[in-house]
Image (tube, coloured by chain):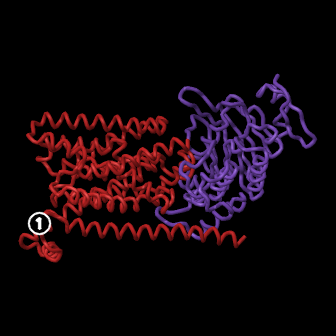
Chain colours: A purple, B red
Amino acid sequence: MSAALAFDGVCAAYGARPVLRAVSTAFARGAVTGIVGPNGAGKTTLLRVALGLMPMTAGALRILDRPLAQWSREGLARAIAYLPQGSDAHWPVLARQLVSLGRLPHRAAFAPLSVEDGQAVDAALIRCDALQFAQRRMDELSAGERARVLFARALATAAPILLADEPAAYLDPAHQLRLMDLLREEAARGTAVAVTLHDLALASRSCDEIVVLHEGRVAAGGAPGAALSDTALAEVFGIVAQRTADGAVVPSRRL
Amino acid sequence: MGGTVSIGQGKRRALFGRARIATLVLAAVLLASFALSFLLGPSPLSAAALFDGLFSGDGMAGVIAREIRLPRAGLALVVGAALGASGAALQGLFRNPLAEPGVTGVTSSAGLGAVLALYFGFAALSPFLLPAFAIGGALLSAGILYLLSRTGAGVRTMVLAGVALASFATALTALALSFARNPYAMSEMVRWMMGSLQDRTLEDLYFAAPLTAAGIVLLLTASRGLDALTLGDEAAQSLGVNVASVRGRIVVGVALATGAATAVAGAVSFVGLMVPHVLRPFYGYEPSRLILPSALGGAALVTTADIAVRLIAPDGQLLLGVVTAILGAPFFLVLILRLRRDA
């Protein structure tokens, strides 16, 4: 089966500064792909290009086997759910109202939430174990609870592709592990999940595939053990890592 | 699990119930204040005579009902609806409960446009030029604030920029009035800066009502986009919302409604600040749920304030904007202090 998202020689730039230099990679259906790399490697840009939030300067991008240019704004919104970095609610709306925003791509202008929309919202809240505070305001929830509600918003879209940018940042270890379990469950349903991560141990333990970005290029890729080889860790991150029995990569010291 | 769902939906129904009751109360207050506003005036006519005059148009009662009372009561409703809806929309756009047409300088700029049109002869060329100039003024300041917000300006910067815009527009209004060599320049200046509904005509109502309605409709078409902006710009875009179009519609809709309202009433402040804030506990925080109730609430507030103006000072020496500012300015202060505490 072909990949849900396929990058072929994709280049992108902020003004004159190139951020992605001929990136070729793919996110498979039913798998969690972890995108790792030092700060400024182009992780977020890779996701933004796929969402059409930032133009490509060269290369080709296929989403569900169709070139990006052929997607309408609404169609793309139904195909890809996106959880941006540092997501939060700007108004203290009720948690359920926030999750309902995930149904916007499925609703006609001025149409109320349909029964199907309501079921998708409830299902997303249940999967994120957030149904019990669905009627609470966002400012009454703890950071971990808010993160679960925001994640449920992305799940409520029921898109075949899910892109999450640094969802584990600012979460305590228990919530991080819970979040990675949710991503794995989502992939088990057939969704193509791609997630940018800074925590190499978390990435190597929870992802099926790893893409290592370095200065806008794909420095390594493949299964976690192979992608995060000693060579890649040394060249890209400038670190030495230990490997645990279950294959997790734990950074131990700077080179 | 089914039990949890039904509890959740029960609470949700409670919120909708609260919203429905609030809407009924607002509608009742508006209806009562509109009727009272229509019945209130210096000439001692009975309610029966006034209603008879309104529908027949005959005699003194007909002239007073149609030419004096109806425009005043109708304009209070239109101006209030325009300012209330604009306040709710601006707060949604800037994601900031302090945003409001008065505080952000939009009404002062609209007033400047109206003064330029009136005292430099443009309004005499065509009756459409008065609202056009006021809307142009409103568009200019709303546009400047919008561009500022695009550069990542925070809450404090936006409020201070609004204060600067308002002062500048007010000063230019005073300058324009002194150049106009109008013998009544002083009293006119005060009237434009504080706002009043005295001596308005039916023609004012004829242009203000459709322009305000058009502005509010434009705001409503963008309201779901405002909800999505609760998640931030990029998340809203990823949900298929055309964020630039939403912002453009809010800025133009606010300019239309506030410009038309200011062209007939001068700069009435704080209505758009108070009304959405008071209504949030009943309707929730989603911007789309607040726009229409804020129009209703603004209409009720301005109509009631205009009754108070006439009861307190029947000689017409008290201006509408004085009453809204006396209510609204302390409100503004409390809101700032509360935001400071929460931050």
Q: Residue furthest right?
A: A245
Give above or below for A98 relative to A204: below
**Could you say where residue A12 lies in the image, as x and y percent from the top left?**
59, 34
**Could you say where residue B44 lies in the image, as x and y percent from the top left?**
12, 69
Q: Residue A95 falls in which quadrant of the image?
A: bottom right
Q: Nearer the viewer, residue B216 or A144?
A: A144
**Could you say where residue B284 lies in the image, as x and y percent from the top left?**
51, 59
Q: Residue furthest left?
A: B59
> Numbered disc 1: what chain?
B
Q: Residue at x 17, y 54 (%)?
A: B316
- What amino acid is labelled 1 in the image? Ser
Local SS, label 1 = loop
**Could you say where residue B105 lies in the image, as x and y percent from the top left?**
33, 41
Q: Residue at x 11, y 47 (%)?
A: B124
Q: Is residue A90 visible?
A: yes
| Quadrant, the C terminus of chain B | top right
Q: What residue is disc 1 on?
A: B43
Question: Total marks drawn?
Answer: 1
Q: Residue at x 39, y 35 (%)?
A: B161
Give above or below for B238 relative to B144: below
Q: Residue furthest top?
A: A255
Left or right of A254? Residue A147 is: left
